[in-house]
Image (cartoon, helix red, strand yellow):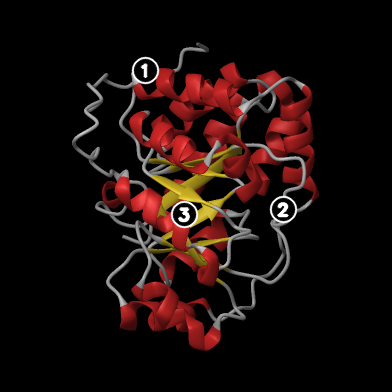
Amino acid sequence: MNNISIKKSFTKNTSTSQKPVNKIPHAFENGKAFIPFITCGDPCLDITKQLTYAMEDAGADLIELGIPFSDPTAEGPVIQQASIRALGSGTTTDKIFDMTADIRSHTQIPMVYMTYANVVFSYGMERFVEKAAQLGMDGLILPDIPFEEKGDFEEICSQHGLSLISMIAPTSQDRIRMIASNAAGFLYCVSSLGVTGSRSTITTDISAMVAAAKSAADIPCAVGFGISTPKQAAEMAACSDGVIVGSAIVAMCGSYGDKCVPHIAAYVKEMKDAIRALG
């Protein structure tokens, strides 16, 4: 496994009468959190598994595992192409669940799935959520489900101990407090309008967004969309509880293919070090 250390194993709670312990709070217990995103199956599921261990070793506090979808409307070209590559190589939801089971036999790092409503609907909403919870996943992000339409998803996730992660954007304005007061796990603060992808500058007043959210609920706020450099990571972490980086990492998967693991591990360490330096 490319000399990547395996984390200590643990026993999953498979009882159907007791909810699994949600591990998301652990991601924010020791300072600012770094949250990387990768597309499962890009370039292959074995590399996805190796990346999970390597990113944890490098300092990641929580990992977003993207389940590829043919029409990822919130994603820019980098992650769109990753989804195409993953689906083209035969990646399926069931194969991702099998990979997750293997990962969960070696590490306790908090993990959430990020995907789209059609993926969950086609699998069966309750079946999907129940399976994810049984595998030890901690949350679910569905960027195409508006706050006002999350009711059914939220109820099922709550029943199984899975956090349905809410998102706020620069356009949320007066809705921020309402969304934050009903949020679970952590609040995903979208830094910029548009789709995912690296940006040279981030002009949104993140401090104001976070302050509005915090005035309504005591929930961690992590900033994503557009962050790609250690300087940006430090700036965003300074006014929030953590940063989320996806496109910059996924781009390395595309560039390096099955040789991407050490490059991404080094990048994650650099980003986490920049955040850690805030004290």
**Amino acid type indicated by mark 2:** Glu
- Whichever of callouts 3 and 1 sits on the residue coming sooner in the sequence is 1
**Amino acid type indicated by mark 1:** Ile
- Whichever of callouts 1 and 2 sits on the residue coming sooner in the sequence is 1
Q: Nearer the viewer, residue 203 or 93?
A: 93
Q: Residue at x 73, y 67 (%)?
A: 194
Q: Could you give the CA–CA distance between mark 1 and mark 2, rounded to whole angstroms?
A: 31 Å
Image position, residue 219 (x, y; %): 31, 67
Residue 6: assigned label? 1
Q: Image check: 273 left or right of 30?
A: right
Q: Could you give the CA–CA distance between mark 3 and mark 1, rounded to whole angstroms?
A: 33 Å
Q: Residue furthest left?
A: 18
Image position, residue 149 (x, y; %): 54, 66
Q: Nearer the viewer, residue 249 or 78?
A: 78
Q: Residue at x 45, y 17 (%)?
A: 4
Q: Residue furthest bottom?
A: 174
| Front tag of 2 and 3 | 3
Q: Could you give the CA–CA distance between mark 2 and mark 3, rounded to whole angstroms?
A: 21 Å
Q: Image check: 155 left or right of 39?
A: left
Q: Residues within 10 Å of mark 3 (few under 14, many from 20)?
A: some
Quadrant location, the C terminus = bottom left
Q: Quadrant of residue 108?
A: top left
Q: Residues within 10 Å of mark 1 (few under 14, many from 20)?
A: some
Residue 153: assigned label? 3
- Whichever of callouts 2 and 3 sits on the residue coming sooner in the sequence is 2
The answer to whether the residues at label 3 and label 1 have Cβ atoms under 8 Å apart is no
Read off the residue under disc 2.
Answer: 75
